[in-house]
Amino acid sequence: MKVSLTGIKPTGDPHIGNYLGAIKPGLELSEQYKSFYFIADYHALNSMRDPKELRKMSLEIAAAWLACGLDTEKVVFYKQSHVPETFELATLLAAFTPKGLMNRAHAYKAMIANNKEMNKDIDDGVNIGLFTYPVLMAADILLFDADIIPVGKDQLQHVEMTNDIAQTINHNYGKQVFKLPQPLLRENSMTVTGLDGRKMSKSYSNTIPMFLTEKKLRKTIMKIVTNSQTVDEPKDPENCNVFTLYKLFATEEEQKALAEQYRAGGMGWGTAKQILFEKLNSVLTPIREKYNDLMADTAYIDRVLKEGSEKARNIADRKIQKLRKTIGVI
């Protein structure tokens, strides 16, 4: 089987946009590929300096993926920090990576542009971890000879850089030292509407977190922005934030039935939101319960990640031994 590799950055509680756009399709990869999933805690270190917060977020995101159905019997699930071979490989890759390539990285260029706009030193706030982020990401990928890397458009450049670095090394040693990975870019990936009608994003504060209690979930759904139509007026389901979200979880029959209620009139927005809440809650309840059970026993999460990291290290060590021989250090 070909290999897929998915990096999961610990960024706090996922919302339903993350679930539909990243977690669910990410889990489906294990049906077609030998799949590796890792918690990218060293990547997070570039911006997250509170050790308690980093550990908390790492546990939360691991619990989220496990609760959503990640089967550790079928996949390799590990923490980046538990596989030191990653960092040895990053050192090797750095020796073949032109500084000019790193200068073109989107995240670095964005920080420089912002600093210029604010009349600051161009490298203000830029740490070497951020600057060399693509090298560490390349190490994550190349260590396991990944064939495909699921990415959004914002991460596409990193896979391209990984290939640039790998090709340089392959050329230098006159053989295929590294397999060249291909990005799995979902150009039509699902865009989930937030509470205000814009794309669901934490930066807009318009998300519906996955693991809210029933009471808080209902309260959040009731905040969805709607127009000022009265109860009696017929409503257009195709131009409604509530119905847009409902379609993501309801069957075709359920969608058709609610659309008819919209067009018939006699239904207020409160009723529509209640129907959405009941549907969404029915989907999230078993996931929420599993997540809460996992977070009540974080020792289990640690054990799962430790076992997965041991599997990953066994594979990584074989790769590193071959690389050491290739470059002449053994």
Image (spheres, rainbow, N blue to C red):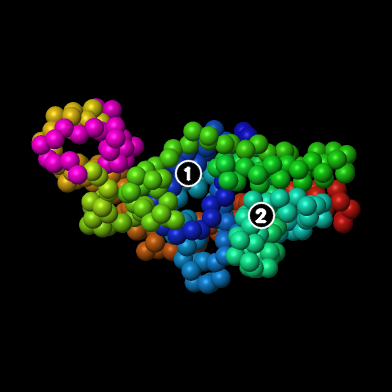
Residue hosting label 2: 109
Residue at left 60%, top 65%? Answer: 118
**Residue type, label 1:** Ala
Residue at image mark 1? 22
Alpha-carbon span between mark 2 and mark 1: 26 Å
Which badge, 2 or 1, is on the more N-terminal residue? 1
> x, y (%) of residue 171?
85, 40
Mark seen at residue 103: none
Q: Quadrant of residue 21?
A: top left
Residue 27 visible at all: no
Quarter that holds the C terminus: bottom right
> Over which residues does the magenta segment extend?
228-254
The crowd level at tag 2 (other Cα within 10 Å; few <14, some 14-19, many 20+) is some
Q: Nearer the viewer, residue 180 or 300?
A: 180
Q: Residues within 10 Å of mark 1 (few under 14, many from 20)?
A: some
Query: Picture quarter containing residue 49?
Result: bottom right
Say what amino acid the circle numbered 2 marks. Lys
